[in-house]
Amino acid sequence: MKYWRKYHPTIGTDDPRYHQVSLIYSVLLIMLIYFGLIGLLNITLFDAAHIAVFDFFGFLLAAAIYFYVSRGGNFKVAGWLVTATLLFVLLAFIHVAEGQNYSLLWVTILPPIAFFLLGPKAGSWVTGLVFAYCSWFLYQLLGQGGPGNLSFGAFFNFIEVATAQIFLFRYYESSRRRAYEQLQKTSATDPLTGIFNRLHLDNTLKTLIAASKRDIQATSVLLLDVDHFKRINDEYGHIVGDKVLVAIANIMKKETRDGDLVGRWGGEEFLIICPKTDAEQAEQIANRIVKKLNSETLLDDINVTASIGIATAVAYEEEHNAETLLQTADKNLYQAKADGRNTVVASFDDVAFDSAQSSI
């Protein structure tokens, strides 16, 4: 496990922020090491205390940002702070060194960090403005005679390299993000119905239950099973059966709310996760779905019904977890089947197995 995961236990490898947060911490650690080490070298070896001041100031800024992020600070804000701190130290060094000793080369480390932390659009603007400023600064130096062996050839080389880096890193970051988003979508989506798959539902439910305990709010799940689905496969074939599952998934998405997560649990079973929802609210959602399925014809002359088991994790019960919640929903689903199908069974107290049940 990465060293920063203890500060952010809810950010898993499937979270879009995972790699960005990892980079923020890595860049901050590198900045702390480099600024501290280079600051000491500038004092002891190069006799450049005036430059070391900026190094140590950058060290303090990096330490402050690290403290801010590790205490739950906003990652987007942290990304901008890291980029701004790096820019401050780099530009200060270039000015103090007056462009000598190839100090302008240091600005070329900016693109990969800016594009990754800020995104293609903001990274392009920040990098473009900084490179434009450095080009202007180099042009001014050349107008004053230029340090060392600098010439207009060096000036044009800098512009060409800077432009190439902007385009290359913008293209790379845009491609990387598109590929990552597609991979995330594929890894979280059921290929048949287009709704969430079991792995994503399982991971999300664990996170939501932990959050419900922290925020003192209930989380409910609806476990739905299509009644007599085998008959549909036997009579119409598996291709038609698949189309029926897709139609049911679409109905569930329409009958649930914007924050609810609808997914396929396996076969003809579906799971709906309802954050910040008590048992009565979950029962209302389940009844809407059952009523809709009863009133709607799927694929010409095919009608289906469904049985739903509901379970709710309440914030004051510490023993509640994803496994006990799903076990209770599954038990209630079997009760709905035993009651004649096409019905809803909910536990109104909590997920304890001796809870009172209500059959609708």
Image: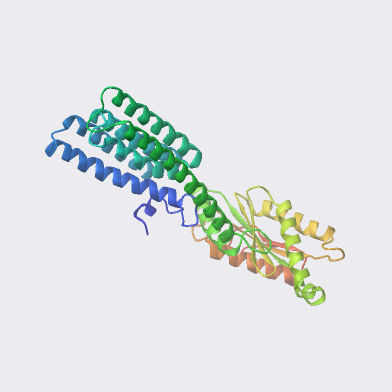
Return the x and y of residue 94 as percentages of the image width and height.
28, 32
Q: How is the image coloured?
A: rainbow
Does 348 sit left or right of 61 as displayed?
A: right
Return the x and y of residue 80 as percentages of the image width and height.
41, 37
Does 310 sit left or right of 133 as displayed?
A: right
Residue 33 seen from this side:
yes
Q: Residue at x 40, y 30 (%)?
A: 132
Foreground of the two, 7 or 41: 41
Does 297 sit left or right of 212 as displayed?
A: right
Return the x and y of residue 168 as percentages of the image width and height.
45, 45
Assign the C terminus to one quadrant of the image: bottom right
Assign the N terminus to one quadrant of the image: bottom left
Among all residues in the image, which is located at the extreme bottom?
234
Foreground of the two, 321 or 263: 263
Q: Residue at x 33, y 41 (%)?
A: 67
Q: Residue at x 67, y 54 (%)?
A: 282
Q: Residue at x 13, y 34 (%)?
A: 47
Residue 74 seen from this side:
no
Among all residues in the image, which is located at the extreme top?
144
Q: Is residue 22 above or below residue 270?
A: above
Q: Could you say which quadrant of the image residue 95 lies in?
A: top left
Among all residues in the image, which is located at the extreme right?
301
Foreground of the two, 170 or 230: 170
Q: Could you say which quadrant of the image residue 232 lies in?
A: bottom right
Q: Is residue 136 above or below residue 1?
A: above
